[in-house]
Image: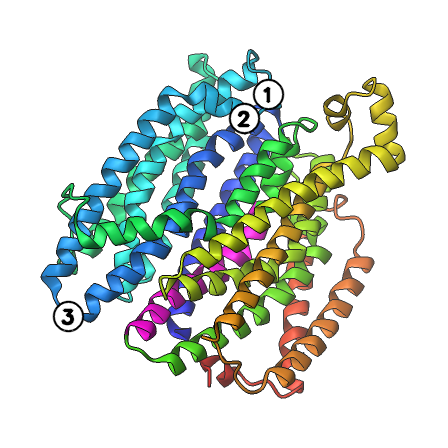
Amino acid sequence: MLRSTAVFSAMTFLSRVSGLVRDQVYAQVFGASAAMDAFVIAFRIPNFMRRLSAEGSFSMAFVPVLAEYKAKGDHAAVKALVDRVAGALTASMLVVTALALLLAPWVMRVFAPGFDPDGEQARLATLMLQITFPYALFISLASLVGGVLNSYQRFAIPALSPILLNISMIAAALCLVPHMKAWGYEPVLALAWGVFVAGVLQLAFQLPSLARLGLLPRPRLDFAHAGVRKIMKLMVPTLFGSSVAQVNLLLNTLAASLLMSGSVTWLYYSDRLLEFPLGMFGVAIGTVILPHLSGRHAASDPDGYSKGLDWGFRLCLLIGVPACIGLVLCAEPLLATLFQYGRFSAQDMRMSSLSLMTQSLAVPAFLLVKVLAPAFYSRQDTRTPVKAALVSISMNVACTALFFLAMLWFSPMGQAALAAANGSWLGALKQVEGAHALLALAIAVAGWVNALQLWWYLRRARVYQVQPGWGRFLVQLAVASVLMTAVVLGLRLFWADWAQWVWWERGWRLLAMVGAGGLVYAAGLLLTGYRPRELRGH
């Protein structure tokens, strides 16, 4: 599992680097504008469907069933399952896509209630939703292909495919935007067409690898097939259970449309930096551990199952704790170095850093969920994660409302905004600077609630036995984290104003800060007796 996780993380690292370049291009070309807010919301809706399929509901339901068919050793049965799942998925997504295209104006009113339905921003967002939504169809089929490849330990190609999305959108921003201006169209429409093309490319890129396994699907529409019925039965509850973080993010995007212009984009950039550790390590660990746990469960190996979980928990904390500290302490340097150019102003950097710092508090929780959720789905227990998800989503909504009310009632800034808006809460929210950070804080609280619930349910089910050495491991982790915090905080105080430097001066200072923190963290682990061989498990 460690080897597979390393391969997946390495490929994902390339994807995240290209994604970083993509976001830098966005920041320089579009900044934090009303048009960019419209694109972020228009893309977030089909991207949410991607998260449900590629990293959520579909994969969590499909991979355990595929593991069962593989365990029987019958290639023909596996091929028949893949054909029929491909047919069912294609038919379902065609219906969903058609409905989304027809109902796009009403969909946008639901997900962006803060946009004037008769205004230019809402019209632009609706048009971009109609262009981008077919991406959900293509990427769902790509996730089917990726799930099969991952089950056969072919992790590299699925992990590399997101690079095509970033390349397509970079090309659209740099090459198509000037033509859009010349043709009299809104330049940001180029990004929507980049998304559409990327979906086709990501699916086509993975098909040759599937063909080499002899599993290239010939879609068959057969909802009566036993495997298809089982996957559908498992998928319904996992729609909530495996994608609670994405549901919370989508809800907070909805709420952000009620705030001052730029809030959606500020949250987008902070979320993109948060996705770096989550995508590189969290998705990698979750992707690798699901087929492993499914195989151990199918082979009736409770000891191997429990050890796999324990390994996943330790790896998540080993990565999640320093990532959390680093993102909180380095929020402004990261955003200034990576994005504060062109139309992305110092104000945009400060606002994005507020939401990055608050949401980063839950990085360890987000990573742990990537292991905790597969622990249930590998045993085909889909109900328990749903219970936790519903509580987490409710907590997010409750915290958002509570934080907003507290800000308006008790803070001088909120009271002044209420007075200026003649007592209108919605009017006041559009005037309060930094209110979007409360949305990020609500997501962080909901993330910890979700992780702690899943942990409690797992312990109550008695399918996980704590392995020896946890006390020593936590002490090692704490000492290394404290040492890293001291070094990074010292450099952060020494280099306070990042806006005064040009890009290369910011770059080497950021590399020095991150590098020094990483070296001290590793040294702290080694000095307290932690050894790399412990990553291999017990």
User: Looking at the image, which is closer to me, 155 or 11?
Assistant: 155
**How far is disc 2 from disc 1 in space, using C-alphas?**
9 Å
**Closer to viewer: mark 2 or mark 1:** 1
**How far is disc 1 from disc 3 in space, using C-alphas?**
54 Å
Q: Please name the residue that numbered disc 1 is placed on.
A: 115
Secondary structure under badge 1? loop
**How far is disc 2 from disc 3 in space, using C-alphas?**
49 Å
Total tally of numbered discs in the picture: 3
N-terminal of the pair, mark 2 or mark 1, is: 2
Q: Are marks 2 and 1 in contact (CB under 8 Å)?
A: yes
Q: Is residue 381 above or below residue 177?
A: below
Query: In the rendered image, which quarter contains the N terminus?
Result: bottom left
User: Looking at the image, which is closer to me, 334 or 412?
Assistant: 412
Q: Is residue 146 above or below residue 418?
A: below
Q: Please name the residue that numbered disc 2 is placed on.
A: 38
Q: Residue at x 74, y 74 (%)?
A: 483
Q: Please name the residue that numbered disc 3 is placed on.
A: 73
Q: Are marks 2 and 3 in contact (CB under 8 Å)?
A: no
User: Looking at the image, which is closer to me, 234 or 362?
Assistant: 234
The amino acid type of the residue labelled 3 equals Gly
Left or right, residue 289 beside residue 16: left
Residue 304 drawn at (x, y percent) = 38, 80
The amino acid type of the residue labelled 1 equals Phe
Residue 365 drawn at (x, y percent) = 59, 60
Q: Is residue 282 magenta?
A: yes
